[in-house]
Image (tube, rainbow, N blue to C red):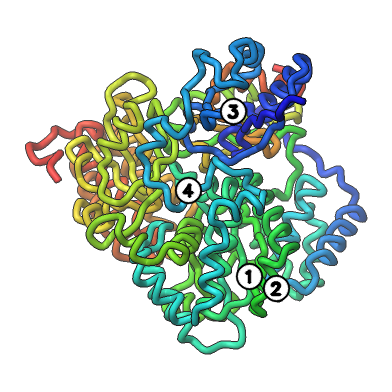
Amino acid sequence: MTQLITVFVPRDSAALAVGADDVARAIQQEAGRRGLDIVIVRNGSRGLLWLEPLVEIATGQGRIAYGPVSVEDIPGLFDADWLHGGAHPLGHGPTDTIPYLARQQRLTFARVGITDPLSLSDYQALGGFEGLKKALAMTPAAIVEEVTQSGLRGRGGAAFPTGIKWKTVLNTVADQKYIVCNADEGDSGTFSDRMLMEGDPYMLIEGMTIAGLAVGASKGYIYVRSEYPHAAATLESAIGNARAVGWLGHDIGGSGHMFDLEVRLGAGAYICGEETSLLESLEGKRGQVRAKPPLPAISGLFGKPTVINNVISLASVPVILAKGAAHYRDFGMGRSRGTLPFQLAGNLKHGGLVELAFGTTLRELLYDYGGGSASGRPLKAVQVGGPLGAYLPESQWDVPLDYEAYIGISAMLGHGGLVAFDDTADLSRLARYAMEFCAIESCGKCTPCRIGSTRGVEVIDNIRDGRQREQNIHLLRDLCDTMLAGSLCALGGMTPYPVLSALEHFPEDFGQARSSSASAN
Amino acid sequence: MTSSSTLPDTVPETTAQQVARQALARYEGQPGNLLPILHAIQHALGHIPDSTVPVLAQALQLSRAEIHGVISFYAHFRSQPAGRVVLEVCRAESCQAMGGERLAEHARQKLGCDFHATSADGQVTLEPVYCLGLCAQSPAVMINGQPHARMTPEKLDRLLAAQEVQA
């Protein structure tokens, strides 16, 4: 009797989008034709996205990686005896020794890509539910204290201390409280939420359950954007499986505690990533921003105290509980503790997910991991933190990736996405796009954002066309001041970041001479 | 845009209202259920016919203006039918960094219509999308809800041909 050989073909959207389903089918057929016994496991993605579909074979020497695999490559791979780790031009050796992966510090993404995302036994075999088990033996205040001590700050971009938010909800008396997961990951250049939901959904479920125990909430919602159909489907399946074995429902793990989850789909509105707008949307309304106060922690969903956290924040909680606050806090620098899953996107040779402690630099990510530009041309600018993040010139690529250090250069780390542009990029055009995007996505509630963004497009058009350039640049700075100071939320309030940074660091793209201080910090 | 077509709403009013009632029943009693209900209607019919609005308004004790306001707020919801194929092309920064604008222009040329419109033969509706979370493999598109990355004009032509779309 021959032993079944396990072949891993990712089911992450990033793999599906480059033909992973066809590859999986072709592997099964080719094995059948050759009379070879294999079992295909659809795992999450390792995050080496330029290699997707990255197929792995389980061998005596560990998992061996081949990629990017296309349907046409498959007969050749079998000829090369890849089922026993045979050499092939697409081979990368043992997956764990690929430097891109081996040099990472994976806490939140520890299981992603390794397991079948929907297998509860895989999850538990690799430490799943250890954090929740510990939390079940703790008081709510002790759980909140552990999260506070870890130094975890909101990974959605605002970087507010998670423990403080939880403490406010814990201390607010109400008959009903909610845990809401903000999975409306709309920033271009970001995909860590999506990969986590598709690659390790139980970790998010576990984190939300711990949050529920910590603050006394029995119900949670995961608000997933409609652009992520596979993430939503994976979560639905995972929630069903968890409920079936009692990790969700009326008696969590036999503890007598109740917590249950519901997935809600967004509908293509970027603004719903803003927390109060998301709550409006969950209530079945237009996603219009609410004025704060009251804070959602005091009066949130349906007017009840609500913890609203990003996917990565919540998914970081199980490991904090399982390994202790100190273990997590030992990673990072300054007031930025723990790790951040950086997302390498745009014009990079080796795009993907790189989880590292805070304190690394853009240069390291762009070159040591990213391998430089995909186009082969020099890199010119990097936008960090999504469409509301600054464009950084090369002179700033050595600033440590740390929340405070980035604030110090009028930039923001945000959700850890970085989009690289080569020297063909026109920064005045990208600045115009920032204003245009704000105009398209503005919820319309406040004037600086609703009107300012449209005026911003017009003013940048005038600058680009050379109409009264100096006066219009002055006007643009003035408009950005108004938007920064007068907008209700970060959409209008931060659209000036990409605009002003482009103007500051790349004046020649706006038809201006570069002054001697233009590219200084 | 001149050559784009507006597709007639061929869903009978009785069918639309029946689908609306089914969606209402499915999510009855769930707080804040308007978005799930609208998703269910659009999933069943491809769009949200105007004739469903009064049904929803009455059942949810909201004004028709409030229902319409929600439908029109969200880019994903459509009141008019789409073509058989919905092509969403990402216009966001990461895709721009990798030739996304060239791809968008190709899609416009090939379909003979602008964004938010349907090709003259009524087959393909072209929509912008702002990020599909495939930014390490830009540019990306979505075709009838399925993501495709590392897109090129040639690859897009092949994918559309596979959907039996005439060039």
Q: Is residue A419 left or right of residue A364?
A: right
Q: Relative to B47, is A173 above or below?
A: below
Residue at mark 3 to residue at mark 2: CA–CA distance: 47 Å
The answer to whether marks 3 and 4 sit on the same chain is: yes
Labels 3 and 4: the sequence-earlier one: 3
Image location of residue A413, percent across then percent down: 32, 51
Residue A75 horizontal/vertical position (percent): 66, 12
In the rendered structure, which amino acid carries the disc numbered 3?
Ile
Label 2 to label 1: alpha-carbon separation: 7 Å
Work out whether disc 2 and disc 1 sit on a shared chain: no
* Relative to A28, residue A475 above or below: below
Question: Mark 2 Cα within 10 Å, few/some/many (few <14, many 20+)?
Answer: few
Asked if the residue under mark 2 is in contact with the one under mark 3, i.e. CB atoms within 8 Å, the reply is: no
Instruction: Calculate the distance from the C-alpha at mark 1 to the C-alpha at mark 3.
Output: 46 Å
Q: Which residue is mark 4?
A: A109
For residue A244, which quarter of the picture?
Answer: bottom right
Q: Secondary structure at mark 4?
A: loop
Secondary structure of residue under mark 1? loop
Determine the residue positioned at 25% across, 42% down. Answer: A361
Three-letter code, disc 1: Glu
Q: Are marks 2 and 1 in contact (CB under 8 Å)?
A: yes
| CA gap, disc 4 and disc 2 | 33 Å
Residue located at (53% from left, 27% from top) = A64
Sequence-first disc among 4 and 1: 4
Q: Is residue A25 left or right of residue A113?
A: right
Q: Residue at x 82, y 57 (%)?
A: B51
Q: Which residue is mark 2?
A: B31
Disc 4 + disc 1, Cβ < 8 Å:
no
Closer to us: A263 or A500? A263
Q: Identify the mark nearer the N-term, 1 or 3.
A: 3
